[in-house]
Amino acid sequence: MQEPSKQRRGFMRWLAGGVGMLALSRTVEADHTPTHFGDKVSHKLVYQCNKADPEYLGHILFSTGAMLRKYGDDIWLVVTCFGPGLQILGKHPTRPISQDIRDRVVSLADYGVHFHACGNTMTALGWKKEDLLEFAEVVPIGVDDLMQLQEKHFAYVSW
C-alpha cells in the first residue's frame, strides 16, 4: 500500500486530469485512518452537505478536492452530511446519486477526507451503520457536529 502522501499526489493528478483516471486510482485499497491530522495540520475545514441535488453535491466535492490539491497533507477535511445530503453516504440511497458523485466521494475518502453521517437523519430514514459506505463516521446530530468542529477551530463552509 502506498503511503498517504503518495496517494494524495495521485488523487491530485486525477482531479487535474479528469474522471478517466479514477479507474486507475481505485486499484489500491486505502486505509481510512488519518495519520497526519490533529494539531499538526495548519488548516481544518468542515463542509455542510444537506442537499441531494447533483449540482450542489458537485460543487462541494470539487471544492473539497481543490482544497486537498492545494494543501495536501496540511489540511483536515470533513464533510458533515445530514438531511437529503446523507444520501451520498448510503449504500443504497433512496434518492438518485450518480455513479460519478459516488466515485468522487469514495475517492476523496480514500485520500483522507472524513465523511460524517447524521445519526438523527439515519433514524428518520430507518438506516443503520451497515446501510452506509464503510468509511462513513456516524455522529449523533449533524448540526451539533458542525458546531463542535467549529469550536475546535474548523473553518465552516455552507453552500
Image (tube, rainbow, N blue to C red):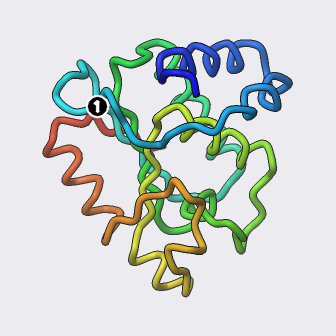
In the image, taking residue 107 as reference, residue 60 lies left or right, namely left
- Residue at the spot of label 1: 37
**Amino acid type for the residue under numbered disc 1:** Phe
Q: Residue, x 54% and y 41% (percent of image)?
A: 109
Q: What residue is shown at x 60% (from left), y 74% (from top)?
A: 131
- Name the residue: 70% across, 13% down: 16
Quadrant of the rendered image containing residue 103? top right
Q: Estimate the x, y position of residue 82 in percent, counting from the top left.
A: 46, 64
**Front residue of this view, candidates 27 and 22:** 27
Is 55 located above or below residue 16 in the figure? below
Q: Secondary structure at mark 1?
A: loop
Instruction: In the rendered view, tell whether residue 111 sits above or below residue 131.
Output: above
Residue drawn 73% across the image and 69% down it = 95
| Residue 45 point in image, percent of width and height | 33, 33
Seen from the viewer's position, the closer of residues 112 and 145 is: 112
Relative horizontal placement of residue 146, taking residue 59 as reference (left or right): left
Residue 18: percent from left, percent from top: 79, 20
**In the displayed structure, does residue 26 sit left or right of residue 4?**
right
